[in-house]
Amino acid sequence: MDRLKGILMIVAGALCWGATGPMMEWLLHTTPITASLMLSVRLIIAGTLLLLFLQLQGKDVLRIWKLPAWRNQLLLFSIVGMLGVQFTFVKSIEESNAIVATLLQFLAPIFIVIYISVMQKKLPPKAQVIGIAGTLAGLFLLLTNGSFQTLMVSRTALVWGVALGFTYAFYTLYPARLMKEWGVLVVVAWGLLLSGIELGVIGRIWASDEWVLLTDRTVIWMMAALVILGSAAFVLFLSSLKFISAVETSVLSSVEPLAATVISVIWLGSSMYGWQYFGMLLMLLFVVYLSIAGKEKTAS
C-alpha cells in the first residue's frame, strides 16, 4: 500500500510539474515579466501559505531554526536545491521552451549515478553505463535533430539545462535527512519561502517596474495556478521519496515531459522535428532503463 501511495504521489507530482512548464513559458514569452519577479512572488506566496497552514495545524515551524546544524542544512537546501531547480528550470524555458527544459532535467539520474559511484569509490555497473549512454544519445538527437552541424537550442539553454540536471539531483538526494527529522511539509515550506526571498534580494525585485503586470487578470490567474501546481508538485515529489527510491522516481517522472509536450503542442503550438521526437522517446526509455538498473543493483 505504501508503495502504491508513493507511485500515485510521484505521478500526480509529475503531472503538476509538467503543467507548470508551458504556463511559465507563456508568461516569459508573451509578457514582459522576468524570471526573477515571477519566481520570487510565486515562491514567497507558496511558502508563506504552506507555513501558515502548518501553523494552524499546530506544527512548531520555527523550532528548526533553534538548532544550527539543521538550520544550516535547510539554508543549503533552499539555495542549491529549491532555488537551484526553480531558477535553472525557468532559465532553460526562457532560453528554449518548456518541452526541452523538462527533458533536460532528466540528466539528474546521471548525476545521481555518478555521485553514488564516487561515494562508493567504484565504477557504476555496466547496466547503468548503458543507461547513461542511451540517455545522452537521446539528448543529442533532441538538441541537434540528428545533425552534427546543427544545434536546435542555444548553448546558453544547454548550460542552463545541465545546471538543471545537477540541481535536480541535489534536490532529490540532499533533503532526505531533513525530511525524516522535520517532515516533508516543513522542509518544503521553508525551502519555498527562503528561496523566494533569496532570489528577490538578488534580483532587487522591490525596485522592479514589473509589479504593474500583476494587476492583469490573466497574469494573476496564471500566477495563482503556478503557486498551487508548483507547491503540489514539490510536496508530492518529496513525499513520494518516503515510499520509493530516489532513482525509481525517474521511471514515473517520465509522465512529466509527456504532459509538458501535450500541453505545449495543444496550447502554445510548439513543435519539434522528427529526430527530436525520437530523441525524446529514447531519453525516456533509457531513463526508465537506468532507473530499473539502479533498482536491481540496490536490491542485490
Image (spheres, helix red, strand yellow):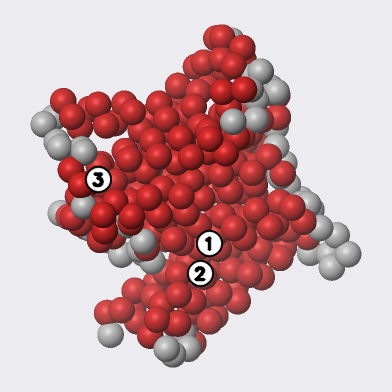
Mark 2 or mark 1: name the one nearer the start of the chain: 2
Kindly report the distance in space between the C-alpha atoms of the residues bearing marks 2 and 1.
6 Å
Task: Kindly identify which residue carries mark 1.
Answer: 166
Q: Residue furthest left?
A: 58
Mark 3: few/some/many CA within 10 Å (<14, 14-19, 20+) = few
Q: In front: 75, or 178?
A: 75
Q: Amino acid at mark 1?
A: Phe
Residue at position x 39%, y 58% from top? 172
Residue 209 falls in which quadrant of the image? top right
Residue at position x 18%, y 55% from top? 181
* SS label for mark 3: helix
* SS label for mark 1: helix
Task: Kindly identify which residue carries mark 2.
Answer: 111
Q: Amino acid at mark 3?
A: Trp
Q: Amino acid at mark 2?
A: Phe
Mark 1: few/some/many CA within 10 Å (<14, 14-19, 20+) = many
Mark 3 or mark 1: name the one nearer the start of the chain: 3
Asked if labels 1 and 2 touch by Cβ distance under 8 angstroms, the answer is yes
Residue at position x 18%, y 43% from top? 63
Q: From this viewpoint, is residue 19 visible?
A: no
| Residue 129 vertical position relative to residue 71 in the rendered view, above or below | below
Residue at position x 83%, y 64% from top? 147
Left-right relation of 61 to 149 = left
Mark 2 or mark 3: name the one nearer the start of the chain: 3
Q: Give the image location of residue 103, x and y in percent.
A: 58, 53
Q: Quadrant of the C terminus?
A: bottom left
* SS label for mark 2: helix
Residue 91 falls in which quadrant of the image? top right
Q: From this viewpoint, is residue 53 visible?
A: yes
| Residue 239 vertical position relative to residue 28 in the rendered view, above or below | below
Task: Kindly identify which residue carries mark 3.
Answer: 65
